[in-house]
Image (tube, helix red, strand yellow):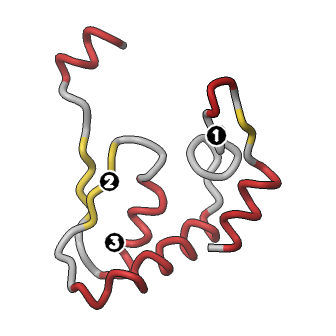
């Protein structure tokens, strides 16, 4: 998706280790119009498969995933870390 690539190029930041920081439009501050268009793009790619759910990780994927689920008219499932894992590392 060209718009996402442009957004990453203009607002993304590459950190040490090659980590891409996109908090300006994807997680800490969300660009809802961009998330809507990303959701539409995902929905367009998968609508022929007739999915029953959208699954995403408990991470920066929630915003575009909820929009994809909305466009497809299906539920969103968020996979979370086990509580015991979080207590040991958080």
Which residue is denoted by mark 3 in the rendering? 69
At numbered mark 1, what does the secondary structure look like: helix, strand or loop?
strand
User: Residue shown at 42%/42% (left/top)?
Assistant: 59
Relative image position of residue 73 (x, y in whole percent): 29, 81
Q: Earlier in the sequence, mark 3 or mark 2?
A: 2
Identify the residue position indicated by label 2 in the image: 56
Q: Are marks 3 and 2 in contact (CB under 8 Å)?
A: no
Label 1 vs 3, first from the N-terminus:
1
Q: Which residue is mark 1?
A: 20
Mark 3 or 2, closer to the camera:
2
Mark-to-mark CA distance, 1 and 2: 19 Å
Q: Secondary structure at mark 2?
A: strand
Direction from residue 36 to residue 2 in the image, left or right:
right
Q: Residue at x 64, y 33 (%)?
A: 18
In the rendered image, which quarter is residue 75 located in? bottom left
Left or right: 6 with respect to 66? right
Q: Residue 20, relative to residue 81: is it above or below?
A: below
Could you tell me which residue is drawn at 26 percent across and 58 percent down?
A: 55
From mark 1 to mark 3, how far is it between C-alphas?
A: 25 Å
Front of the two marks 1 and 3: 1
Residue 76 is labelled as: none
Circle 3: is it few (<14), some (14-19), or many (20+) Cα within 10 Å?
many
> Which callout, 1 or 2, points at the residue further toward the start of the chain?
1
Asked if 41 appears above or below 58 in the picture, the reply is below
The picture places residue 1, in percent across and down from the top left corner, at 61, 73
- Given residues 25 and 8, the one toward you in this image is 8
Q: Is residue 69 above or below residue 72?
A: above
Q: Which is more foreground, mark 1 or mark 2?
A: 1
Cα–Cα span, label 3 and label 2: 10 Å
């Amino acid at each position: 998706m060209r718009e996402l690539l442009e957004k990453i190029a203009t607002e993304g930041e590459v950190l040490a280790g090659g980590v891409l920081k996109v908090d300006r439009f994807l997680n800490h501050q969300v660009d809802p119009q961009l998330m809507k268009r990303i959701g539409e793009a995902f929905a367009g790619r998968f609508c022929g498969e007739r999915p029953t759910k959208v699954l995403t990780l408990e991470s920066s994927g929630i915003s575009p995933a909820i929009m994809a689920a909305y466009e497809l008219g299906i539920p969103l499932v968020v996979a979370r870390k086990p509580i015991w894992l979080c207590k040991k590392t958080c």
